[in-house]
Every structure is written in structure tokens, then in C-alpha cells.
Amino acid sequence: MTLPSPSLPPPSPSVVPATGIAVELRDRVRLHRQLSGWSDDQLRQAIDVNRRLIDAAHANDDIGPLFHGTVLLRRILKDRASAG
């Protein structure tokens, strides 16, 4: 299995990309701004997609970008919950 290369998702997609949300640390701030426009349901769906991709990854696959994407998605949801 080849994991997707990190890429920035559209500002507010109708469907979460099947490749998940992979984040390189240098793109974290820009991606955070883009993902902040997503609904809570979209963020949860993206977390689920990332989790499934990580679970399906082979031992030699680099899951770091997917893991960082999942952490960022969860942080956005947590920030909204504490602000709301």
C-alpha cells in the first residue's frame, strides 16, 4: 500500500478525500486555516478516514503525515468544543 503524499484539501469539500488528510509539519498552519472552515461532521469523517488508512498501512509505510493530520483535525474539534 502506498500512502498519499501530503496535499492540501479543498476549503470545504462535499466529501472527505479517500486519501485522508496527510500533513507535513511545514504546512500545518496553512492547513489549519483551511480545515477550520469544515463542519464538525466533515472533521470527524476525515479523522475516521485517516484512522482506517493508518490501520491498513503496512509496517514500512510512512504514516507520520496521516498521524499529524489526525492530530490537527482533533485539535480543531477540541478548540471548537472549548470555545463553544
Image (tube, rainbow, N blue to C red):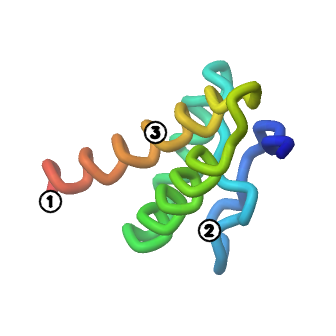
Label 2 close to label 1 by CB (< 8 Å): no
Label 1 close to label 3 by CB (< 8 Å): no
Q: Amino acid at mark 3?
A: Leu
Q: Residue at x 43, y 70 (%)?
A: 39
The answer to which of 57 and 46 lies nearer the viewer is 57
Vertical side of 14 occupied by 18: above or below: above
Q: Name the residue carrying label 1.
A: 84
Between marks 2 and 3, how big is the CA–CA gap?
16 Å
What is the x, y in percent for residue 57? Answer: 68, 42
Q: Amino acid at mark 2?
A: Ser
Q: Amino acid at mark 1?
A: Gly
Q: Name the residue carrying label 3.
A: 72
Crowd rating for badge 2 (residues with CA inside 10 Å; few <14, some 14–19, many 20+): some
Crowd rating for badge 3 (residues with CA inside 10 Å; few <14, some 14–19, many 20+): many
1 or 3: mark nearer the eye: 3
Q: Name the residue carrying label 2.
A: 12
2 or 3: mark nearer the eye: 3
Between marks 1 and 3, how big is the CA–CA gap?
18 Å
Image mark for residue 9 = none
What is the x, y in percent for residue 44? Answer: 42, 64
Which quarter of the rendered picture does the N terminus lie within?
Answer: top right
Vertical side of 67 occupied by 8: above or below: below
Q: Quadrant of residue 61?
A: top right
Q: Residue at x 71, y 64 (%)?
A: 17
Q: Secondary structure at mark 2?
A: loop
